[in-house]
Image (tube, rainbow, N blue to C red):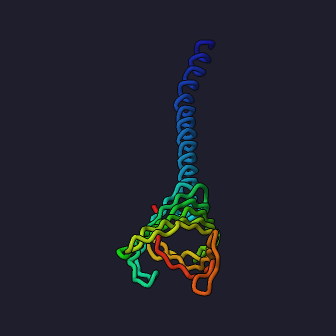
């Protein structure tokens, strides 16, 4: 009787063991699948900040044109670089070189700018800058003093391609240590149009 009962209990334990193991395996697989699904969902969560204005993004821009000064016509070549210290906050520097006439003119402009990336379609920006103008000698050896100015800018960015943005805005600039005359005022307001490539 005892042997029969022990044999029955032993047989039941053996029969139950694979079932328990199967349940444990199924639970483990379910847990792993849930973790993978949660990881995928987290990965798919989109960053609300456009890539061009995220912390760590870099901006490059190039410009070319012509302008008249000192009664002559100049070719202007320029470029700039910016780095986003935080989302929407850029610290940068732009440069322009005026040639081939004399005096040659070199402009260097460190600047700071904030882009309101939260706005859809177009992104407004607001910034401030300091500009230093380095003057070369005139055609007859005349010497010109280097000058400086402070200014601000406001406008909008519009995405025109992958990583390419156009900007349209207005700039206010105030010359430092300046005595205004009828032909040479100490402040100026002018439009700005540019194209930037973000990386």
Quick one: which residue is furthest to the left in this view? 100
Which residue is rendered at x = 49% and y = 69% of the image?
A: 144
Left/right placement of residue 141 relative to residue 191 reads left
Which residue is rendered at x = 49% and y = 59% of the image?
A: 58
State the residue in front, 109 or 89.
Answer: 109
- Please tell me how many numbered marks the rendered image carries: 0
State the residue in front, 160 or 155.
Answer: 155
Image quadrant for the C terminus? bottom left
State the residue in front, 118 or 62.
Answer: 62
Quick one: which residue is furthest to the top in this view? 2
Which residue is rendered at x = 60% and y = 63% of the image?
A: 112
Residue 184: give x, y in percent of width and height.
58, 82
Residue 71 lies, with reference to residue 44, above or below; the image says: below
Residue 61 in view: no
Which residue is rendered at x = 63% and y = 77% of the image?
A: 186
Residue 183: give x, y in percent of width and height.
57, 86
Residue 8 in view: yes
Left/right placement of residue 72 relative to residue 176 reads left
Left/right placement of residue 63 relative to residue 155 reads left
Image quadrant for the N terminus? top right
Residue 113: give x, y in percent of width and height.
61, 65
Residue 118: give x, y in percent of width and height.
64, 68
Residue 160 lies, with reference to residue 38, above or below; the image says: below
Quick one: which residue is furthest to the bottom in this view? 182
Residue 76 lies, with reference to residue 16, above or below; the image says: below
Choose top left, top right, bottom left or bottom right for residue 142.
Answer: bottom left
């Amino acid at each position: 009787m005892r042997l029969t009962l022990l044999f029955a209990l032993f047989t039941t334990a053996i029969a139950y063991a694979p079932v328990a193991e199967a349940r444990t395996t199924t639970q483990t697989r379910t847990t792993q699948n849930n973790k993978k699904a949660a990881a995928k969902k987290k990965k798919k969560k989109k960053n609300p900040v456009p890539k061009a204005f995220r912390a760590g993004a870099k901006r490059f821009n190039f410009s070319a044109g012509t302008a008249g000064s000192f009664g002559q016509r100049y070719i202007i070549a320029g470029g700039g670089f910016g780095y986003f210290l935080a989302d929407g906050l850029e610290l940068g520097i732009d440069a322009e070189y005026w040639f081939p006439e004399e005096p040659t003119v070199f402009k260097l402009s460190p600047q700071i700018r904030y882009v309101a990336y939260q706005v859809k379609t177009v992104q407004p920006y607001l910034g401030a800058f300091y500009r230093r103008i380095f003057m070369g000698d005139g055609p007859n050896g005349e010497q010109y003093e280097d000058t400086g100015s402070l200014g601000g800018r406001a406008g909008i960015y519009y995405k025109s391609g992958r990583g390419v943005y156009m900007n349209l805005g207005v700039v206010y600039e105030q010359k430092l240590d300046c005595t205004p005359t009828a032909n040479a005022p100490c402040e100026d307001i002018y439009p700005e149009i540019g194209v930037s490539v973000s990386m």
